[in-house]
Image: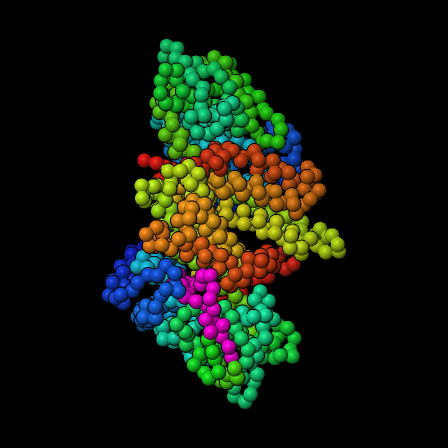
Amino acid sequence: MDFAIEETEEQKKFRAEVRAFLEKNMPGGMEHHVDPVDQPREQYELRRELGRRLGKKGWLYPNFPKEYGGSDMSADNVMVLSEELAAVGSALPPYYDSGARMGAPTILVWGTEEHKKRFLPMMFRGDIRTWQLLSEPGAGSDLAGIKTTAIRDGDHYVVNGQKMWVGSAHGADYAWTILVTDPKGERHKNLSWFMIPMNLPGITVQPMDVLATGGEGGAGGGCKNAVFFDNVRVPAENLVGGENNGWKVATTHLEVEHGGTGRLNDRRVIYEFIDFCKETHDGHRIADDPDARAQIAELYIEAEITRLWALRNHWLSHAHKPRSYEGPQYSLRRKLSSLDIAERMLRIAGPYALTTDKRWAPLNAAIEYFQRDAITSLHPGATTDIQKVIMARRMGTGGREREQAGKLK
Amino acid sequence: MDFSLNETQQLIQDSAKDYVSSACSRDVLLKIDRNSGEIMARQWKQMSEMGWTGMAIPEAYGGSGNSLTDVAVLFEELGVGPVPGPLFTSAVLCARIILEAGSEAQKKALLPGVAEGKRVFALAMTEARYGWAPENVHMKAKKEGADYVLSGTKLFVEDAEHATDLLVVAGIDGEKGLSLFHVDAKAQGVAIRPLKGFMVGMGEIVLDKVKVAAASVIGGAGKAAAPLDRAMLASVPVLCAYKVGGCKRVYEMSLAYAGERKQFNTVIGRFPRVQDHLIYAVNALDSARWTTYEALWKLDNGMDAAASVHVAKSVASEGYMKATDMAHEVHAGMGVLREYGLTLHTKMSRSLFHTLGAPSLHRKRLESALELMPA
């Protein structure tokens, strides 16, 4: 067994190459905002610029095939790359890009060659930013119960309805979404996936004011939106994975969303908080208190298990090993342990954990943000209850045949 | 990065699986449970012949010098049984202590016997004021000429009844530090008494003016604390792997039972409340598994493993106990029927909970490893 990236000579060289690349290519003036809601448009644009520079080298979605703009990069090298990006305060991808992160693996499995050539390179080059659009006002956990329709009309589908909890600030170029293509059809056999240009007439984006964004990818989201479709005419060739075959296609999308691939360098704030407790601030060292120390030890254990499961899932997916319940298991743990850790931080640091005040907030108010984010993160990508439902199916409880994990390439 | 077993480890796993399923059926384990002497009569010779008693011992001292991860793979499968007996205490823990503390001559004199399974060591450390920290050791040896004399009681000693040799941890009157005294289990003044109850293989050892020659002090007098600490740090994750095996078994038993047992005309595994117990159990299993194997990987690669070892012991001790609790929730009455076999694990999970330090001790040690203690 080996829990580290094997730093072969080749990988050491790769790390040096990444460092040199980032030194040259990190756009100047990038600032870190603890709460993504504070990130102004020009900061978002800098991240997109970094994305394009990475994309040009095939490093934005590096584990994807070269022929579509990835690099066929090994799991170990992807980890090197994401570590080096994290070290300079960024992430892979450097901005919220849920539609590509989850859409691209899905298109790779279910799309036609034409789809792959059309959609993947522009995602992987960083030319477009894509949001995923799944939930609706009446369909959260029950994804198959969505109501937004896409009705065939000649060479087009006409889309009407509303999606919720979508994206981030500063808009997107494409929407990766699941819609009802046969309103009278049988449940699970009436859905299809689409890649929809967001500049089509009839699409309105309306920001929602939420407690925190719970964004993915370490780059944060900024806000969530409601997206309205009013007679939006979408070219028929933008349907991916076959008409009314959307529930099958969804298994791949959801596998990625449900944590099947693990997250690396996740929640560094937890380890930064431990360091903070060891330092003296305003004449006070939190770790001097035995009760605080006991809580910190518990918090560390929670964080370590979560980190190890992320690493395991990363290995399982990148080494193409069979998977069953591991994706939802990790997602469930990440959600619940984040909340547990946030609450321990509150016990340990007291009201310091709750303030954004510049004079008093620890770690630039990252702890305050974590308090809100841990609560918000309980729900995106399926609630904890839904994660348990999926886990139980994959474990094969009740003598059922074990449900297989969603297909990944 | 690689979370899979290598070829050697797969071979070890296969032969251990074979052994547990063929030689340690539920009936055999229940028999051993009723009469602990059976373990030596039935299992020990086979285990020794398969080389398991020598796995953790370097080739220079008659063993096969396997990595700790290799050894842990074996113990994970023994934990599936759960196969009781002194293999861990003697061939891993005590062997490691002798390796860490002993002089070259002592290692040459003692370890080949352990590797062959002829010597069976037990670690007599804990006492009435129970605990695994050095400050819990109150026994003091008296100096008599060049020799030492030991008197007092060691309590909750693992596998004491099977031991041919004892490593007694004690201080020396008027001197600082802890020492390791090698005592023949049959020596005059040694009385070993197995303890009964909801526990496995624990005993009381009363020492009444037991004479120990200076040459039988392992390593230097008063210098045992540091090597003892190193040896325990290396052995703990192997014990954790045994608990991982236990978690795996009770999870699989529960999953199978929930797939067969019908109530309200439905197999109970379809009920979300029952699924919650199964999910809890598999989470306990995977938490224990990966914290344990990361600690082993760090130890095998000479990295600082202290924090990982303390995390693993805390997680595996709690996890094994909780996993058996969940198994009982799923099995209801069937689970407490002794002949069903689940209670072998329930008892083992309790009995091993404190061995080599309770989770609370390891969390305290973790505080130090994370450098949280005041300057």
Magenta region = A206-229
Residue A101 found in image quarter? bottom left
| A154 over A135 or under it: above or below | below
Tell me which residue sits at (62%, 75%) in the image.
A189
Does residue B293 appear anywhere in the picture? Answer: no
Tell me which residue sits at (44%, 23%) in the image.
B137
Residue A358 found in image quarter? bottom left
Report the front residue among B153 and B249: B153
Q: Position of residue B319 (x, y in %)?
A: 54, 43
Identify the image quadrant of the N terminus of chain B: bottom left
Query: Residue B309 in magenta?
Result: no
| B194 over B329 or under it: above or below | above
Does residue B127 appear anywhere in the picture? Answer: yes
List the single residue furthest toward the top: B145
| B45 over A155 or under it: above or below | above
- Main SS type for the magenta part? loop
Report the front residue among A149 and A225: A225
Q: Position of residue B122 (x, y in %)?
A: 49, 27
Q: Position of residue A409 (x, y in %)?
A: 47, 67
Tell me which residue sits at (53%, 21%) in the image.
B205
Q: Position of residue A372 (x, y in %)?
A: 45, 57
List the single residue furthest toward the bottom: A154
| A386 over B246 or under it: above or below | below
Report the front residue among B183 and B348: B348
Identify the image quadrant of the C terminus of chain B: top left
Tell me which residue sits at (44%, 29%) in the image.
B133
Query: Residue A210 in magenta?
Result: yes
